[in-house]
Amino acid sequence: MTHGTSALDDPVGRSLRGPHARFARRLGKAVTYLPEVTTFSAVSVDADADAPDWDDLAELLGPGEFADMFSSPATPPSGWEPVFRLEGRQMIRRGEGRPGHPPVRPGTEVVELTADDVPQMLDLVARTRPGPFRPRTRELGTYLGVRDNGTLVAMAGERLRPPGWTEISAVCTAPEARGRGHAARLVRALTARITARGERPFLHVAETNTGAIGLYERLGFETRKQVTFRGFRTP
């Protein structure tokens, strides 16, 4: 199945108004995830000229609250305090990647993570900081992990779901388990699941994370566009 890329220009908004509607809070054209699920919010893409969208989002979130606008290019009006800015890129999978799989370390296994694994998932995220991850983020899609003798040492999962696409996210490995091919195994496994249901995988990565960019390129991903991740504080 062929999917156009226009949905990827507003991945948060298209997810919340589509496959992730059950996780959404809405007011007017503003939309945001439930806070226990993830941090992202969206306004209409042409919101630079539409102040009511921003007023709706401010009311939805509350005064002095964090508005994580992810990769939205829309600029809020004065009074919205900048919190962070991070340059990155959006990558989509076009090719099959280089053949071959890394050797599997004895005692490790790839498993599908469940609600019972959330404490370990949150601990791994706290140690590796792959990006926003909340207690209910796991509900956005399938999350896979690698256990080494029973301990969760790596994971990756499905996050944003604009129509026709699934984002691979939270790719992280504990420091003591790096260099063993766990991230590649997990991304390959998720890619297979996503393509099997007729969707295409995509992902986001910080521009400074050159090691991850190289890995994703070897796995068949290519840069679609540069993006800027931004967050603001509501008035």
Image (spheres, grey):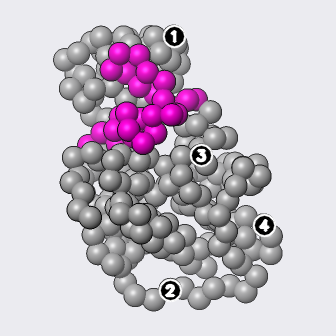
Percent of width and height locating residue 160: 44, 46
Labels 4 and 3: the sequence-earlier one: 3
Q: Is the C-beta separation of discs 1 and 2 under 8 Å?
A: no
SS of the residue under disc 1:
loop
**34 magenta-colored:** yes
Magenta residues span 9-35
SS of the residue under disc 3:
helix
Of residues 110 and 223, which is closer to you in this image? 110
Percent of width and height locating residue 206: 41, 52
Q: Is the C-beta separation of discs 1 and 3 under 8 Å?
A: no
Residue at numbered disc 2: 101
Residue 83 visible to an observer of this rendering: no
Residue at numbered disc 4: 151
Q: Residue drawn at (59%, 46%), measured in percent from left and top? A: 139
Q: Amino acid at mark 3?
A: Glu
| Horizontal side, residue 199 vs residue 59: left or right | left
Furthest residue toward right: 150
Of residues 2 and 63, which is closer to you in this image? 2
**72 magenta-colored:** no
Labels 1 and 3: the sequence-earlier one: 1
Labels 1 and 2: the sequence-earlier one: 1
Viewer-nearest of labels 4 and 3?
A: 3
In the displayed structure, 120 sits above or below 96; it is: above
- The local crowd at label 3, few if under 14, some if 14 to 19, many if 20 or more residues have their Cα within 10 Å, is some
Percent of width and height locating residue 210: 41, 64
Residue at numbered disc 1: 63
